[in-house]
Image (spheres, helix red, strand yellow):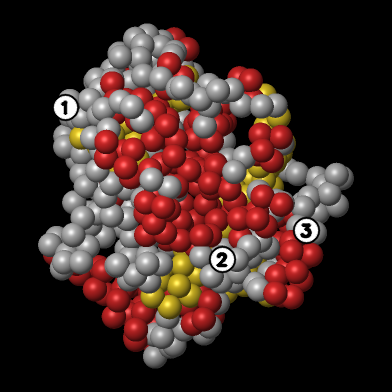
């Protein structure tokens, strides 16, 4: 029997090209300001309109400042990119959620929370972390700028079908182990290239028990394993999350949609190209020590000795430690922290703020730590206020900023200075990712909060009430 990935992919193929890529129909195209200007220019030069503009949604997120959004953007490059998207969306008649629009935010947070990302869809965007939307049971993946133009013009894309992989995680996660830890553990075990050529279906009791916010985090990081994308079969958790959202089906259409969505699952006899199973008991709170997301360890462990690294990877291991200012064999616990970043399409949802606040409550931000707490959308910001999370965090000395990608990739004003250490809930710890010369330690919201109130890398379990 075919896998769920096969079902969704094959049902969207417009035509098969012998010994070539498939012509795949895209149900949804998301556009942000960084990867679209050239695509719009191409359409303009060729005199082409968007084929199905109602399927395309645009919003700025990478370049938006996280303060004073009601004022003109100061940075000239950021302003130019955001202004270009505003003009292009208007010219081509596309839905546009601009800055200060209550529907604005990081595109991979807004899509699901507005009910735009739905089970069984194919979803594309000029951004690698489009895999996030797979958490609703969609086949979602990032594409290049020229491919963005292709989808605008035809609502189709030429793609070779990836192989299928199933990752099962069985058991129950321990105290203080977050979905981010699950993803960092998978990257450590599989490596950042272990998913290359595959689309991953996540399953098992750990995934079934996970909230939608947690599922978004896991699917978001699929790309960091080298996979084309990752997704989770829709279930009652998915339906409950999507019900009543702005663009979700309503009334009888909702009932029809759910009846169809319940068929979206891999059968017991489905054959995957690769299957891997993990035990939840082996997963601990994680943190990275190097310069790729696969260089992670349990926060209580020591940095590996060089002798434990495969010979082919030792040179890059040494370079990573040199960049980070770390040494093999030394503990991560107690490492000095300068910055803490809570946010990004990985961990910028209300559940992540709840987790951070659970550690911060009754404590205070450590002296010398700069903390950027950035909601993933204006809707998340509204939820934070409605639940009183803002009061808890402000009492602990934290300020909640305005929505945007922020310090995830430093295309805006939020840049970690050279040489400084940042415990970050984002998705990548590459050299200079959060600012030239910055040093990033990827971790969960719980671990980020623990570092923020102690000023050093700390096992969050020691601070949990």
| Residue drawn 39% across the image and 90% down it | 47
Precedes in sequence: disc 2 or disc 1: 2
Question: Is 81 on the left-hand or right-hand side of 348?
Answer: left
Element class at badge 1: loop
Distance from Cα at disc 1 to Cα at disc 3: 51 Å
Instruction: Measuring from the top left, give residue 447's x and y in whole percent.
Output: 40, 27
For label 2, the SS is loop
x and y, in percent, of residue 357 in the image: 38, 35
Q: Label 2 neighbourhood size at 10 Å, few (<14), some (14-19), many (20+)?
A: some
Label disc, if present, on residue 245 of the rendered structure = 2
Nearer-the-camera pick, 195 or 113: 113
Q: Position of residue 343 (x, y in %)?
A: 36, 45
Q: In the picture shown, does residue 191 fall above or below 462?
A: below
Q: Place residue 452 in its image quadrant.
A: top left
Residue 144 is situated, as x and y percent measured from the top left of the image, at 43, 62
Q: Residue 304 has which mark?
A: none
* Mark 3 neighbour class, 10 Å CA radius: few under 14, some 14 to 19, many 20 or more: some
Q: Label 2 vs label 1: CA separation?
A: 41 Å
Q: Nearer the viewer, residue 208 or 396?
A: 396
The residue drawn where x is 37% and y is 67% is 102
The residue singled out by tag 3 in the image is: 262
Which residue was labeled with disc 1? 368
Foreground: disc 2 or disc 1: 2
For the residue labelled by badge 3, is the local secondary structure a helix, a strand or a loop? Answer: loop
The Cα–Cα distance between marks 3 and 2, rounded to whole angstroms, is: 19 Å
Mark earlier in primary sequence (1, 3)? 3
Which residue is depicted at the point 65% across and 72% down? 249
Residue appearing at x 85%, y 44% in the figure = 268
């Amino acid at each position: 029997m075919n896998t769920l990935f096969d079902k969704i992919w094959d049902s969207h193929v417009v035509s098969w090209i012998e010994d070539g890529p498939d012509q795949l129909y895209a149900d949804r195209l998301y556009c942000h300001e960084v990867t679209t200007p050239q695509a719009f220019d191409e359409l303009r030069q060729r005199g082409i309109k968007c084929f199905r503009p109602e399927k395309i949604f645009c919003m700025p997120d990478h370049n938006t400042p996280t303060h004073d959004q009601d004022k003109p953007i100061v940075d000239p490059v950021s302003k130019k990119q955001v202004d270009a998207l505003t003009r292009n969306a208007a010219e081509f008649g596309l839905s546009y959620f601009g800055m200060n629009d209550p529907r604005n935010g990081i595109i991979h947070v807004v899509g699901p929370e507005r009910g735009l990302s739905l089970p069984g869809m194919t979803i594309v965007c000029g951004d690698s972390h489009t895999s996030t939307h797979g958490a609703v049971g969609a086949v979602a993946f990032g594409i290049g700028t020229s491919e963005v133009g292709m989808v605008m013009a035809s609502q189709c894309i030429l793609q070779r079908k990836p192989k299928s992989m199933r990752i099962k995680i069985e058991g129950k996660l321990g105290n203080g182990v977050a979905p981010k830890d699950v993803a960092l553990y998978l990257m450590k075990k599989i490596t950042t290239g272990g998913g290359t050529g595959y689309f991953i279906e996540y399953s098992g009791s750990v995934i079934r028990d996970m909230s939608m916010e947690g599922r978004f985090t896991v699917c978001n990081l699929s790309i960091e394993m080298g996979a084309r994308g990752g997704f989770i079969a829709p279930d009652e958790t998915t339906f409950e999350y999507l019900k009543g959202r702005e663009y979700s089906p309503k009334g009888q259409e909702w009932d029809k949609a759910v009846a169809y969505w319940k068929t979206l699952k891999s059968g017991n006899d489905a054959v995957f190209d690769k299957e891997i199973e993990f035990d939840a008991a082996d997963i601990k709170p994680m943190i990275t020590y190097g310069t790729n997301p696969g260089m992670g360890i349990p926060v209580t462990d020591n940095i590996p000795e060089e002798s434990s690294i495969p010979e082919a990877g030792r040179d890059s291991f040494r370079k990573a430690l040199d960049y980070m200012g770390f040494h093999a064999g030394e503990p991560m616990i107690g490492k000095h922290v300068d910055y803490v970043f809570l946010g990004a399409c990985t961990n910028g949802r209300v559940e992540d703020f709840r987790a951070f606040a659970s550690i911060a409550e009754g404590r205070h931000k450590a002296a010398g730590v700069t903390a950027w707490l950035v909601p993933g959308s204006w809707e998340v910001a509204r939820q934070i206020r409605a639940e009183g999370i803002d009061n808890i965090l402000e009492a602990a000395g934290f300020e909640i900023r305005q929505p945007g990608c922020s310090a995830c990739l430093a295309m805006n004003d939020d840049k970690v200075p050279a040489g400084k250490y940042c415990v970050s809930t984002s998705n990548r710890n590459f050299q200079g990712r959060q600012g030239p010369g910055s040093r990033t330690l990827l971790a969960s919201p719980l671990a980020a909060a623990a570092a923020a109130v102690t000023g050093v890398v700390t096992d969050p379990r020691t601070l949990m009430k």
